[in-house]
Amino acid sequence: MEQVVIVDAIRTPMGRSKGGAFRNVRAEDLSAPLMRSLLARNPALEAAALDDIYWGCVQQTLEQGFNIARNAALLAEVPHSVPAVTVNRLCGSSMQALHDAARMIMTGDAQACLVGGVEHMGHVPMSHGVDFHPRPEPQCRQSGGHDGLNGRNAGAYARYQP
C-alpha cells in the first residue's frame, strides 16, 4: 500500500456570510484561485499530472450545482484531461474528499490529487432545495437543518426502516 503525503494546504480568508468581502464572489470563483495557487506554489507538480480533483460541497444547487469541482478546475485552467468530482457528506464533505483521494493514492490508482472544498453560505442557504422524505420520524427529517447539517442525529437515520 502506498504512503499518502499532504504536500501543501491553503484556504480563502473567512468572511461574514452575508454582506462581507465575498458577497459578490461566486463559489466557483472562491475555489479556482485556490487551485491555481496550490499549483503555483508547487511548480514540481504540473496540473496535467493530477490524476483527479476531489472537492467537497454540501449544497450542490444554484451556483454550487452541476459538479462545482469541474467548473472550478476549468476556471483554474486545469487541463480538460484532469477529471474532477464533487463530494457530499454534509459537514464532512471536504474531509470525505480527502479520504477519497488518499484511498486512490493508497491503492495505487492515483499518484497526485488536488483536494479541497467550498460552501458559499451567503449565496446558497442551507435549506435551499431540500425536500425531506415524509416517512422518517419528524425529528430525523429536520435534524440536518436544525443541527446545521452536522449529523448529530445520524444514529436515528440508521435505525429507520422503510
Image (spheres, rainbow, N blue to C red):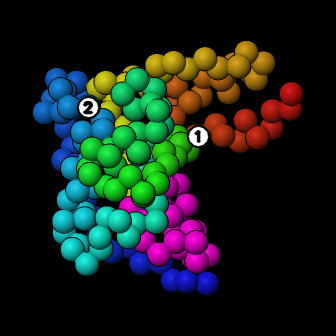
Q: What residue type is labelled 1?
A: Arg
* Disc nearer the start of the sequence (1/2): 2
Count of numbered badges drawn on the protein: 2
The C terminus - image quarter: top right
Q: Say which residue label 1 marks.
A: 152
> Would you say 161 lies left or right of 150 here?
right
Mark whose residue sits in front, 1 or 2: 2
For the point 24% across and 39% down, which residue is it? 29
Q: How far apart are marks 1 and 2 (CA)?
A: 29 Å
Residue pointed to by mark 2: 26
- In front: 88, or 136? 88
Give coordinates of residue 109: x percent, y percent. 58, 72
- Callout 2 crowding tier (Cα within 10 Å): few <14, some 14–19, many ≥20: some
The stretch of residues the image draws in magenta is: 91-114
Classify residue 70 by image quadrant: top left
The answer to whether 135 appears left or right of 111 in the picture is: right
The answer to whether any part of residue 54 appears in the image is: no
